[in-house]
Image: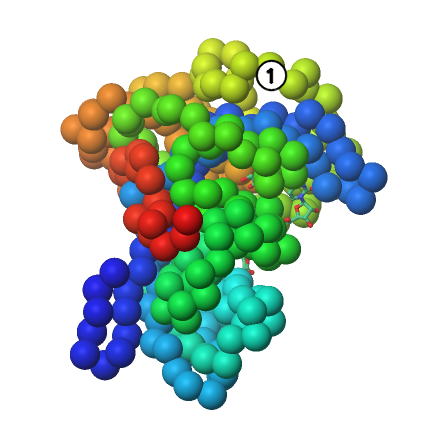
Amino acid sequence: MESLDSGWQDFPAPAKLNLFLHIVGRRSDGYHLLQSVFQLIDLADTVSLRVSEGGEIQHLNPLPGVPAESDLTVRAARLLQKATGCSKGVDIRVEKRLPIGGGVGGGSSDAATVMLALNRLWQLNLTRSKLMELGLSLGADVPFFIFGESAFVEGIGEIMTSVATPDAAFVILHPPVHVPTPQIFSDPDLTRNTVPIRVRHFDSAVTRNDLEYVACKNHPEIRENIMWLSQYADARMTGSGSCVFASFSSPNEANRVIYDLPKNMTGYVARSLSKHPLHEFAE
Ligand SMILES: C[C@](O)(CO)[C@H](O)COP(=O)(O)OP(=O)(O)OC[C@H]1O[C@@H](n2ccc(N)nc2=O)[C@H](O)[C@@H]1O
Ligand SMILES: Nc1ncnc2c1ncn2[C@@H]1O[C@H](COP(=O)(O)OP(=O)(O)OP(=O)(O)O)[C@@H](O)[C@H]1O
C-alpha cells in the first residue's frame, strides 16, 4: 500500500490455494456446485492504481494475449463505476507474479484488489457483502478474495464461512501447462457426485481435488509434478490447475524441498495468510 509522489499507490493481490475441492453437483445453467477450503497465501501480484478525474479507465501494461478491455482489473473498475455512478477514473498497472491459469486465482485476486482499493480511493463506502455480490459476475473466486480470510466455500463459490486453518508453509510447483478452467469442468470424465461434507472443516485424509484426475489425464506434466512433490508430503492440485502444492510446518522445511527441485521444474515457497492485506478496506 505504498504511496508514491506521482499519485500511484501499490496494493497486493494475494493468491489462494484450494486445500481441497469437491464437486458435489451441477446447476441447470451448467455451473458446478462445489465444496472447498480456500486458503490465502503471501505470494502476490502488485496492482498499482492512480486515480484520475474524468472517468477514464486505462490499463497501462496489459498482459500479453489479454486485451485491456477483457482484463479483470479493468472490468472490475468499470463494474464499480456502473454500480455507483462514480465519475472518477483510474490508471492501472499490474506487476504479475502469479502464474496465469495456475489455479491460484491470480486474475480474480487482481479484480478483488481493484474493487477493495477503489472502494477506498473513490470513497464509495460499499459494504463487503455488496462488493462480493458485484464481484461474482467477474469470476467465481472474486467473492472469496473480497471476503478476505480462510473460508469453507460452497455454492458455485459464493457461499462462504470463515474457517480456522493451521499456519503453514507451502511448496507450490507450476507445471509448464495452461489449463483452461471451462475445459476441465466440461470433461465427461469429471465426477460431479461427491457426497457433501457436513462438518465445515479441513481434513486432508478424507478430502481431495475432484478436478485433479481430469487435469492430469489431459496434462501429464501435472501428474509428474504431483508425484515428485509426494516424495516429501501429501501433494495435490489447486483449483483447476495447473499448480500443485504440499504443506509443511516451517518455511525451512519447504525451502529444503525447493533446494532439491530439478532444474526443469518451477516452484515457489509461500506462507499462509490469515487475512487479506486490504481486509479493512470494506466493512
Ligand atoms: C474451480 C476454481 O478454480 C476454484 O477456486 C474456481 O471456482 C474457478 O474460478 P475461475 O477460474 O474464476 O472461473 P470462472 O471464470 O468463474 O468460470 C470459468 C468457467 O468454469 C466453469 N465453472 C466455474 C466455476 C464453477 N463453480 N462451476 C463451473 O462450471 C464454467 O464453465 C465457467 O464458465
Ligand atoms: N489480471 C488478470 N490476470 C490474469 N489473468 C487474467 C487477468 N485478466 C483476465 N485474465 C484472464 O483470465 C484467465 C484465467 O486467469 P487466472 O490466472 O486467474 O487463472 P487461475 O489462476 O486458473 O484462476 P482460478 O484459480 O480462479 O481457476 C487468463 O487466461 C486470462 O485470459
Horizontal and vertical percent for residue 250?
20, 25
User: What amino acid type should be assigned to the residue bearing mark 1?
Assistant: Ile
Describe residue 68's horizontal placement relative to residue 227 as left or right: right
Q: Quadrant of residue 49?
A: bottom left
Query: What coloring was used for the rendering?
Result: rainbow
Evaluate whether residue 126 shows in this view: yes
Q: Which residue lies furthest to the right in this view?
A: 28
Note whether 278 is above or below 185 in the view shown.
below
Residue at (69, 25) in percent of width and height: 24
Note whether 101 is above or below 165 in the view shown.
below
Closest to the observer, 221 or 256: 256
Q: How many labels does the image show?
A: 1
Residue at (69, 40) in percent of width and height: 185
**Where does the N terminus fall, quadrant-wise?**
bottom left
Horizontal and vertical percent for residue 277?
30, 48
Describe residue 179's horizontal placement relative to residue 2 as left or right: right
Residue at (60, 31) in percent of width and height: 154
Note whether 119 is above or below 199 in the view shown.
below
* Location of mark 1 (residue): 197
Beta carbon at label 1 within 8 Å of ligand 1: no
Residue at (37, 24) in percent of width and height: 165
- The 10 Å Cα crowd at callout 1, few under 14, some 14 to 19, many 20 or more, is some
Label 1 sits on a secondary structure element that is loop
Evaluate whether residue 217 shows in this view: no
Horizontal and vertical percent for residue 264?
35, 43
Q: Which residue lies furthest to the bottom in this view?
A: 54
